Amino acid sequence: MDRHAGTGAVLAAISLGGALVLVGGVPLQGGVQAVGTITGIVIMEHPPAPSTVEVNADEAVCGETVPNEEIVADSAGHVANAVVRVAGVPWPVNVAPPTINNAGCRFVPHVQIAPTRSQLAITSEDDTLHSTHSYDDRNRTDFNIALPFAGMHVTRPLRRPGVVRVECDSHSWMRGWIVVSNDLGVVSGIDGSFTIEGVPPGTHELSIWHERLGGQPQTVTVTAGETTEVQFTLEMP
């Protein structure tokens, strides 16, 4: 065996059972790359009490108030709607397309993350005129969709990475956010928790985004077949 062939053999180590293969330093399980999981919690100190926003139009449909969703945190400081991303890790194939609904004179979900070039499905279930007006991170309009009655369905592409702000021109309190990203990510739940599966083993940088709170990136090391835990503490800017 020549030296080049020998090097290739070193980079392909097969276990006795033939299940684990190491190619170029990346473990494979049954011919598929073995991956790890990142799980964590997002917290803040001195969380604000839940509050509402006064409705000043279409009260018959929207009610007199809607929840203030700028900071959603429980009494223990667990923060929802924070976006955590793994730098340089792409999305898996066949990700479900993102959706945004005008429901109860709110954008649902309030915060989401979607792969770049996704097709955003826009709909409304409110019997009033809404618009889904998106602004990119340069404050330029990307699209502005009028939804004059319930049951409409429209799709629009999310062409470039960045933070997209969504507003309704008819109802000034309505606001939502879409983080369009090339990097794999998730949104923290109502209990502040998040889980990112399918992360290749190695050292990765995690970034975090929240519409009002600030946080610092962290570096984590992921091991194939194991779960790495992390905690983010956010603060008012």
Image (cartoon, rainbow, N blue to C red):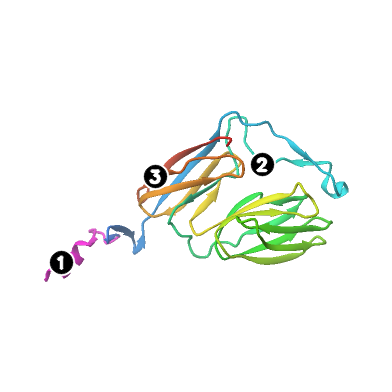
Where, quadrant-wise, is the C terminus in this rendering?
top right
Q: Nearer the viewer, residue 136 or 102?
A: 136
2 part of magenta stretch = yes
Horizontal side of residue 61 vs 187, given as left or right = right
> In the picture, residue 116 is in which quadrant?
bottom right
Q: Nearer the viewer, residue 16 or 140?
A: 140
The image shows residue 89 at horizontal and vertical percentages of 43, 57
Query: Going from the N terminus, do you reach mark 3 or mark 1 first?
Result: 1
Mark 3 residue element = strand
Height in image: 231 above or below 99?
above
Label 3, label 1: how many angstroms apart (C-alpha)? 33 Å
Label 2, label 1: how many angstroms apart (C-alpha)? 59 Å
104 part of magenta stretch = no
Query: Going from the N terminus, do you reach mark 2 or mark 3 first?
Result: 2
Where, quadrant-wise, is the N terminus in this rendering?
bottom left
In the picture, the disc for residue 70 is 2
Mark 2 residue element = loop
Judged by depth in the image, the label closer to the viewer, 2 or 1, is 2
Which residue, given by chain and number where applicable, does mark 1 sit on? 6
Hey, what amino acid is under mark 1? Gly
Query: Going from the N terminus, do you reach mark 2 or mark 1 first?
Result: 1
Horizontal side of residue 106 vs 96, given as left or right = right
The image shows residue 104 at horizontal and vertical percentages of 78, 49
The image shows residue 227 at horizontal and vertical percentages of 41, 45
Q: Residue at x 78, y 50 (%)?
A: 105
User: Farthest residue toward the top?
Assistant: 46
Which residue, given by chain and number where applicable, does mark 3 sit on? 220
Report the magenta residues as a range.
1-19
In the picture, the disc for residue 42 is none
Hey, what amino acid is under mark 2? Glu
Horizontal side of residue 165 vs 10, given as left or right = right
